[in-house]
Amino acid sequence: MTEIIVVTSGKGGVGKTTTSASVACGLARRGKKVAVIDFDIGLRNLDLIMGCERRVVYDFVNVIQGDCTLKQALIKDKRIETLFVLAASQTRDKDALTTEGVRRVLDELIADGFDYIVCDSPAGIEKGAHLAMYYADRAIVVVNPEVSSVRDSDRILGLLASKTQRAEKGESKVQEHLLLTRYSPKRVAIGEMMSVDDVKEILGLDVIGVVPESPDVLSASNAGTPVILNPDSDVARAYDDSVGRLLGETLPLRFLEEPKKGFFARMFGG
Amino acid sequence: MGLLDLFRRTPPTASLAKERLRIIVAQERSSRGAPDYLPLLRREVLEVIRKYVNVDPEAVQISVEKEDGQEVLEFSVALPEKAAG
Ligand SMILES: Nc1ncnc2c1ncn2[C@@H]1O[C@H](COP(=O)(O)OP(=O)(O)O)[C@@H](O)[C@H]1O
Ligand SMILES: [Mg+2]
């Protein structure tokens, strides 16, 4: 059985691509065969985060338009044996993606025995975002603890419940999970930032992970190494826990509190 | 929290964010799947009411409720404390 997971949010710049890359790596590292697809047509980015930008020859739209085979377009990860990337095209023609085209690519991946297909959604609620979620079995809704992000994600929940194949066919609902990222326990503690419980209460979703705000994410994208592969990072641990929960493990949430600091650091903040 | 934090204290606003979101999300959820003309209807109703009373846009709420299998259009208009004509 192949599971199709969409990573979506409504709002841009909240951490969808970061999450897609890390979740795909995390699943693959646990032995699953994983394809991660960039649906952000015209604004290809996942290839950079995955560190395979110089190996893109063919892209998603090329496959759909029959310029190449899916095999030719899938980029095999150099670190993890069972991980493959399908890049977005840089064409500005957003109509290049079609429902039937996407279906064909997904069907071929399913026939190839992939365990997971991770769809990195573009921002917005237009065609690209719609297609990224259309065939999903599960949705990871990426949210920042900030008003516009929370509101936009609620709109996405509305679309997941009405504009997906599962909704249209009256099948069981797309399974929705909340992934709260760029979380700053310190700011939550002093009432400057909404807590995970606040956001959970407003959206009424189960929490698959809470990822702290950290400079490690920028370092990872600079290097083209998904942050989950950084063994010294709390962000990596938080993403790996999320992957575990996705696979059905029951794990307590971590990194909800500020790391304990020494006396000197406590006195002078920072 | 360190000593320095005490000096650069901004007022805590998380609870404000939560309260505002609670209201707007509930409102947007209730209008989901409602007829497309609702926002326009609301605007026009507001204009008509404003010919008589100067109400705030917030004061006019329109929603579609389901009651015994029937769809009911609900209006509510909160008048200002002292209705100025
Ligand atoms: N946990 C985090 N801590 C700090 N910065 C983050 C974190 N997650 C994402 N970012 C930063 O936020 C920006 C947007 O991330 P990205 O994954 O590209 O978002 P999206 O795909 O939703 O547009 C990037 O600059 C990324 O480095
Ligand atoms: Mg992105």
Image (cartoon, rainbow, N blue to C red):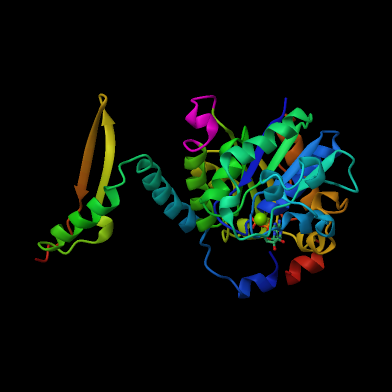
Residue drawn 46% across the image and 36% down it? A162
Q: From the viewer's side, name the closer residue of A254 and A104.
A: A104
Q: From the viewer's side, name the closer residue of A178 and A6.
A: A6
The C terminus of chain A sits in image quarter: bottom right
A86 displayed left or right of B22:
right
A98 displayed left or right of A234:
left
Q: From the viewer's side, name the closer residue of A204 and A128.
A: A128
Predominant SS of the magenta segment: loop
Residue A165 belongs to magenta span = yes
In the rendered structure, which segment of residues is drawn in magenta? A161-172
Residue A269 belongs to magenta span = no
The N terminus of chain A sits in image quarter: top right
Residue A62 position, x and y percent, is 71, 49
**Total number of numbered labels?**
0
Residue drawn 69% across the image and 55% down it? A89
A119 displayed left or right of A197:
right
A189 displayed left or right of B67:
right
Q: Is residue A224 above or below residue A136?
A: below
Give ligand 1's quarter of the image: bottom right
The image quarter containing residue B70 is top left
| Residue A256 appears anywhere in the view | no
Residue A144 position, x and y percent, is 60, 54
Residue A133 position, x and y percent, is 58, 41
| Residue A131 appears anywhere in the view | yes
Residue B85 position, x and y percent, is 9, 66
